[in-house]
């Protein structure tokens, strides 16, 4: 996939794009491909209480917080949405979205389906994109590679993935995530964003 590098030109009606899908579908990998392609957007960094994994950087991959810090942010209403997932807390910082939208920049938020459901209720004019695995077998293989075939939580993740796929009516678009061709996945998301920019009645997101 090749694009000319896009400058972060402010938009009169910046978009809030919510990318979701089952665990292991390739959300992070797809967004990384979009970054490398030079597409212009602000990616919101999620806050979490889970432990940092090898190679991850605070403020880049996640905002790594203690549980006490996370709870303080909840009390101050500083998250657009938050949830406990597999024993850890995850939340989308509200001010980061507000600031980027105020500057006229498109914003991408990466959340699980539960988070997307919450955001849909709060901000229905956001653009909701569901990344779909080519098959349940492919998704199972990806989860096994990530967590191990004997992982205690593997069956739980697979079961939850099936429930999440049943939430498709919540979303505006479905994009297949092919592990061997994430450039195609990224280009389809970019095509959706381009099409949304051509709407006669633009989406207007106000927090």
Image (cartoon, helix red, strand yellow):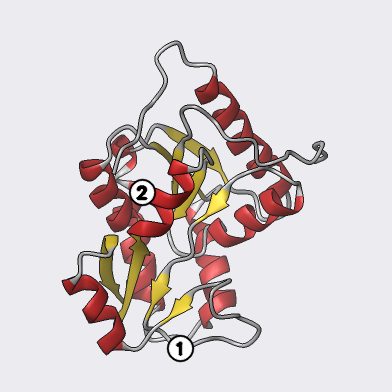
Label 2 CA crowd tier, 10 Å (few <14, some 14–19, many 20+): some
Residue shown at 45%/64% (left/top)? 23
Label 1 CA crowd tier, 10 Å (few <14, some 14–19, many 20+): few
Image x and y of residue 3, in percent: 80, 37
- Of residues 38 and 206, which is closer to you in this image? 206
Sequence-wise, the earlier of marks 1 and 2 is 1
Quadrant where the N terminus lies? top right
Residue shown at 58%/71% (left/top)? 60
> Left of 105 or right of it: where is 155?
left
Residue 138 seen in the figure: no
Quadrant where the C terminus lies? top left
Per the image, the residue denoted by label 2 is 165
The kind of secondary structure element at disc 2 is helix
From this view, report whether residue 193 is shown above or below residue 94. Answer: above
Toward the left, the furthest residue is: 75
- Of residues 167 and 52, which is closer to you in this image? 52
Residue 193 seen in the figure: yes
């Amino acid at each position: 996939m090749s694009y000319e590098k896009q400058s972060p030109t402010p938009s009169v009606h910046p978009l809030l794009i919510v990318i979701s899908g089952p665990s292991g579908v390739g959300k992070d990998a797809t967004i990384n491909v979009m970054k490398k392609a030079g597409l212009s957007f602000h990616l919101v960094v999620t806050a979490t209480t889970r432990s940092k994994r090898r190679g991850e950087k605070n403020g880049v991959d996640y905002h790594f917080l203690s549980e006490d810090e996370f709870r303080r942010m909840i009390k101050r209403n500083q998250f657009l949405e938050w949830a406990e997932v597999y024993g850890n807390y995850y939340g989308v910082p509200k001010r980061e979205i507000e600031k980027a939208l105020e500057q006229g920049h498109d914003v991408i938020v990466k959340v699980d389906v539960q988070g997307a459901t919450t955001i849909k209720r709060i901000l229905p004019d956001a653009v909701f994109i569901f990344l779909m695995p080519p098959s349940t077998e492919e998704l199972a293989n990806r989860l096994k590679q990530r967590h191990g075939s004997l992982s205690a939580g593997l069956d739980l993740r697979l079961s939850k993935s099936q429930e999440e796929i049943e939430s498709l009516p919540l979303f505006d678009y479905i994009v297949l995530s092919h592990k061997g061709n994430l450039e195609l996945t990224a280009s389809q998301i970019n095509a959706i964003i381009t099409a949304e920019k051509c709407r006669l009645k633009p989406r207007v997101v106000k927090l």
